[in-house]
Image (spheres, helix red, strand yellow):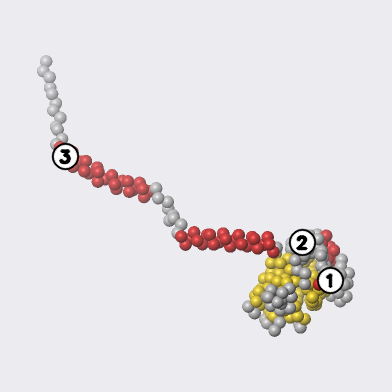
Amino acid sequence: MRTTTTQIPLVSLAALSILAALLLAAAPAAAQEQAASSRPDTAPATAEATDSDAEATAAARRERFRRLRYGNLAELELNGKQLRISYPDLLADSDDYRAFESLAAGDVAAWNSGRAIKLLTHASLSFDGIIVPYGNASPDYPGVYSLWTRRTADGWSLVFNGEADIWGSQRNATADAAEVPLEHSSADEPAEKLTIEFLEVEPGAVLRIAWGDHQFLAAFEAAP
């Protein structure tokens, strides 16, 4: 029996060398493609963005601390001088508010559920000629007062008391420093809780106090 032998052509060493070189050249390009596909679509945060986030976080932390320390705040810059009133959360649906509504003439509003309203002012204030002086606690320190509303025989007034850091039921009448009339009206919309704000009106401002159905206004300016 005759046996047929098929000869397989041999690949030359030169051809193998060329093939290997081509494969090695293609490998880096494929690796680069794979690395590119694994990169995130968004660019990494820059130092500027990180600083901005840190600043926003710090500002939010300072605001939380300020509210914990002072409660609600009303603030104003008057002729370059700072004024700040801090006041507690006093709901209109409360025993404190019902006691406020039942005040008799001559009585001053008080409450058991919060600190007294506190004014800190870097300027002496004039309420139609009635002066609330700067530096009542110390010549080198801003004016500090607690504020109290009084029902009078023909309306309402605002009492400035020299003892500022006290509870809302601890007014000492002997420390009263000044008293100014308040313009009273019914609020257009009832205030669910005590609200105090400054309204800027040239040449000074207006202090606005709202609580339940009541609104009180007192215009003032910086004293000379």
> Which amino acid type is shown beneath numbered disc 2?
Gly
Which circle's residue, 1 or 2, is located before the other in the chain?
A: 2
**Residue 114 - label:** 2
Q: Residue at x 67, y 71 (%)?
A: 75
Nearer to us: label 3 or label 1: 1
Distance between mark 1 and mark 2 Cα atoms: 19 Å
Q: Residue at x 71, y 69 (%)?
A: 85
Q: Which residue is labeled 3 in the image?
A: 15
The spot of residue 121 in percent (x, y) is 69, 74
Which circle's residue, 3 or 1, is located before the other in the chain?
A: 3
Does residue 1 sit above or below 132 in this rendering? above
> Which amino acid type is shown beneath numbered disc 1?
Ala
Nearer to us: label 3 or label 2: 2
Mark 2 surroundings within 10 Å by alpha-carbon count, few (fewer than 14), some (14 through 19), many (20 or more): some
**Residue 173 - label:** 1
User: As rendered, which of 178 and 163 lies closer to the eye?
Assistant: 163
Could you tell me which secondary element the residue under label 1 belongs to? helix
Does residue 121 sit above or below 224 in this rendering? above
Which circle's residue, 3 or 2, is located before the other in the chain?
A: 3
Mark 3 surroundings within 10 Å by alpha-carbon count, few (fewer than 14), some (14 through 19), many (20 or more): few
